Every structure is written in structure tokens, then in C-alpha cells.
Image (tube, helix red, strand yellow):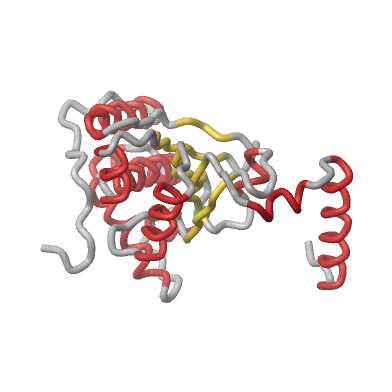
Amino acid sequence: MPYRLRDLLEQNRRWAEGVEASRPGFFTNLLQQQEPQYLWIGCADSRVPANEILGLLPGDVFVHRNVANVLVHSDLNALSVMQYAIDQLHVRHIMVVGHYGCGGVTAALHNRRVGLADNWLRHVQDVRNKHRGFLDSLPDDDARLRALCELNVLEQSLNVCETTVVQDAWARGQSVVTHGWVYGLHNGLLQDLEMTIRNADEVQPAYARALAAVHLRRGGSAPSALPSATRLANPGET
Ligand SMILES: [Zn+2]
């Protein structure tokens, strides 16, 4: 729905007045510090805004978003967000949030060229290729897209767990729990993919359980030989 820019500024003024009216001092209190409990790593899609979906106000969730909610070990932007969130803000939960109907995942699934983002979406194609046998066994493209949206969350969650930032936090005993969720554009609901990980020892079994659940949800049987939970190679790695 198109808005004139001055309408947006007016809406912002009314929003700020409403927040201040319901919670006097809200903004001046936020000036002092931010103490978010959550780091949200999600897709840049305009239909998946972190705060609104969670029903949270400014100050409650630290957010990093990019096309197709990708977390790769060479992305200094994402790693810097994670490091600041964990080391400075002491967030307790990191949620990797994908969504069904993701345009980036769709392009990756079908080798659709969209421009410069093709290079970014290579990371999602790596996920597709890792699970190609399972995806090919599904009955149609809708099922394959839903499955790849879920698998991408699992693999990016795995990448989060294997960053030095999270590994170091766990090693020093800091409480950081990672989660993998997927959001339904059609109903506004988040689904927990049950890849909840509290320490380094839980990474492999949580990945195996969550992956088996993806297979079962899509009507298949749990894989007898699970793909390794080792992270996907970064470009340039051998
Ligand atoms: Zn998306």
C-alpha cells in the first residue's frame, strides 16, 4: 500500500505519542541503555518484521536481517552483530528465523537469476545441494520450497553455533541458547523447528533431530544416514 512520505512521518508522530501515552518515559528510559534478551537473524522480506511478529517494543530485540536469513562465516557484518549482541549486550537467545514462500530461497531452489544476489544465494544453493536427494524425493515444487525454507534455517542455525563468537561464549560458561524458527506469511505464526541448542555438545544431536523432523513433516521417513552437521564450506575454502 503506497503512502506519501509526509504520511509516514505523521504516522510516526502518532505512534510515538501513543507509546509515550501508554508507557510514560519509555523513550527517555531507552536513552540510558538497551538490554535486549534476543538476537533475531531473519530475512529482509518486508512481511517478516521482528518486533511486530514478537509483539515487542524498541529495545527488546537486536536484529540482523539479510536476503534469505543467511549466516556465513565470512560475513563480517553479521559476525559483528553477533559479537556485539553476545559480548556487549549479553543476549540470552539467538533465533534464526526463515519464512515460507521466501523469494531468495525460491530463486535458489530453481536456479533463478535475480542479479547480484545470485552470488549471495549460492549459500542457499549449497543447502539445496547438500539435501538434494531428499528434496528430489518430494512430490512437487511447493513441498520442495517449504522443505528448503526449513532446511535453510537448520543449516544457518548450525553456522551460528559454529561461529567463534558462540563457541567462545559457551566455552566461558555464558548462557546463550540458539533456536531455529520458521514463519508463516499466510497465518502470521512462528513454528519452532526444535533446533534448540544450549552448548557445543548439543549441536550434533539437535541438528539430527530437527532434520529428521523435517523429513517426517514432509511425508518421508527419517533419514537412515543423516548428512553431517559439519558446516558448509565458505566460498574460497577447499
Ligand atoms: Zn525471505
In this view, which residue lies farthest toward the bottom?
Answer: 116
- 150 horizontally vs 101: left or right: left
Please report the residue visible at 30 percent of the width from the left and 27 percent of the height from the top.
212
Please report the residue visible at 68 percent of the width from the left and 55 percent of the height from the top.
31
In this view, which residue lies farthest toward the left?
Answer: 238
In depth, the one of 222 and 139 nearer the eye is 222
Residue 105 % position (x, y): 43, 54
In depth, the one of 14 and 20 nearer the eye is 20
Q: Specify the quadrant that holds the C terminus.
A: bottom left
Asked if residue 44 is positioned above or below residue 29 in the image, the reply reads below
Residue 114 % position (x, y): 45, 71
Q: Specify the quadrant that holds the N terminus.
A: bottom right
Asked if residue 171 is positioned above or below residue 156 in the image, the reply reads above
Image quarter of residue 190: top right
- 130 horizontally vs 123: left or right: left
Please report the residue visible at 52 percent of the width from the left and 48 percent of the height from the top.
101
